[in-house]
Image: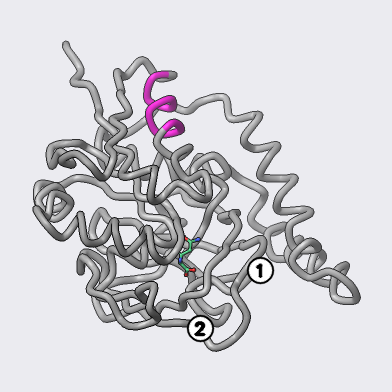
């Protein structure tokens, strides 16, 4: 049997590459190759056309001006809309999440039209910029599909409200997530939005495999000794980095208690 090559599009890394989220495309392709499944990463710059025929699209984080340029390009010929309509999977991180929503904050501070592929609206937060480690407990729907406690870091000034029909990834344990420390992420169909940098798929191989399973079906397990070591280190030390000073030990113990019952997992 011939297996078709899975194509992973890395969307506009020149504009949306500030936080290293391009690593997510590498992780997706490599986890397929390790299982003997052909995969390619297609790097697409904003100067050329974005193919609408790839299997997975990876959209990363960036600053306010580049993200609005990216949104403008993606709205022109609507390649991502066509791809999503055809069943493609999209991973959109931070600016990516914001741009895929209904509207986001432009570089002039005013609302800018988003792609509308996620039901969410992003405005300028009133408080300080959300910067630091982020830990999220996936909702029951995603934990039933193998997703365990998610670890990443956030760095954003925008805050995001979800609209009906779009659900969060889960509940924030450490950090602020979408807005105020309650929920994180925006998922609609096969479009997965998150505020987690890391890259998120390097820190959370279970999420990489969940997204891949939407394309190729059930996946054989891999030896994840190294990413699991990274996860353990981040889940152990991240909370104290986020809450320095007096709350430090308490925040770490709090998180340990929460995840202990569930195991560190993948
Ligand atoms: N420019 C956006 C914000 O500050 C997104 C930042 C990011 O992608 N990390 O909210």
Element marked by disc 1: strand
> Within 10 angstroms of label 1, few (less than 14), some, or many (20 or more) residues?
many
Majority secondary structure of the magenta segment?
helix
Considering only vertical position in the picture, is 168 above or below 59? below
Q: Please give left or right for residue 89 compared with residue 66 in the image.
A: left
> Does mark 1 have its CB less than 8 Å from ligand 1?
no
Give the numbered dot on residue 251: none
Q: In which quarter of the image is the N terminus?
A: top left
Q: Provide the residue span drawn in magenta.
A: 26-33
> Does mark 2 have its CB less than 8 Å from ligand 1?
yes
Q: Please give left or right for residue 214 compared with residue 177 in the image.
A: left
Give the numbered dot on residue 174: 1
Considering only vertical position in the picture, is 101 above or below 218? below
The percent position of residue 168, horizontal first and vertical second, equals 40, 69
Mark 1 or mark 2, earlier in chain: 2
Disc 1 to disc 2, C-alpha distance: 18 Å
Q: Residue at x 43, y 31 (%)?
A: 26
Q: Which residue is drawn at 12% across and 55% down?
A: 78
Q: Which of 241 and 150 is in front in this view?
A: 241
The percent position of residue 57, horizontal first and vertical second, equals 28, 44
Q: Residue at x 38, y 43 (%)?
A: 13
Considering only vertical position in the picture, is 100 above or below 201? below
Q: Which of 28 and 141 is in front in this view?
A: 28
The percent position of residue 218, horizontal first and vertical second, equals 32, 33
Q: Does the magenta stretch include residue 29?
A: yes
Give the numbered dot on residue 125: 2
């Amino acid at each position: 049997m011939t297996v078709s090559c899975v194509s992973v599009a890395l969307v506009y890394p020149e504009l949306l590459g500030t936080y290293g989220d391009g690593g997510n495309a590498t992780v997706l392709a490599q986890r397929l190759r390790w299982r003997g499944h052909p995969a390619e990463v297609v790097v697409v710059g904003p100067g050329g056309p974005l193919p609408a025929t790839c299997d997975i699209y990876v959209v990363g984080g960036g600053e306010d001006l580049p993200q609005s340029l990216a949104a403008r390009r993606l709205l022109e010929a609507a390649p991502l809309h066509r791809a999503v309509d055809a069943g493609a999977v999209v991973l959109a991180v931070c600016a990516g999440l914001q741009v895929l929503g209904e509207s986001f904050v432009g570089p002039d501070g005013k609302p800018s039209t988003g792609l509308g592929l996620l039901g969410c609206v992003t405005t300028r937060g009133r408080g300080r910029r959300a910067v630091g480690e982020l830990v999220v407990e996936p909702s029951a729907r995603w934990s039933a599909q193998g997703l365990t406690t998610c670890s990443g870091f956030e760095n954003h000034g925008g805050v995001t409200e979800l609209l009906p029909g779009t659900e969060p990834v889960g509940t924030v344990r450490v950090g602020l997530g979408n807005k105020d420390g309650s929920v994180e992420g925006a998922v609609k169909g096969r479009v997965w939005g998150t505020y987690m940098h890391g890259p998120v798929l390097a820190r959370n191989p279970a999420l990489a495999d969940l997204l891949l399973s939407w394309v190729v079906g059930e996946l054989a397990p891999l030896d994840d000794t190294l990413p699991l070591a990274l996860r353990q280190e981040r889940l152990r030390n991240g909370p104290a980095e986020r809450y320095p000073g007096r709350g430090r030990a308490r925040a770490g113990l709090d998180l340990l208690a929460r995840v202990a019952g569930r195991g560190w997992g993948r």
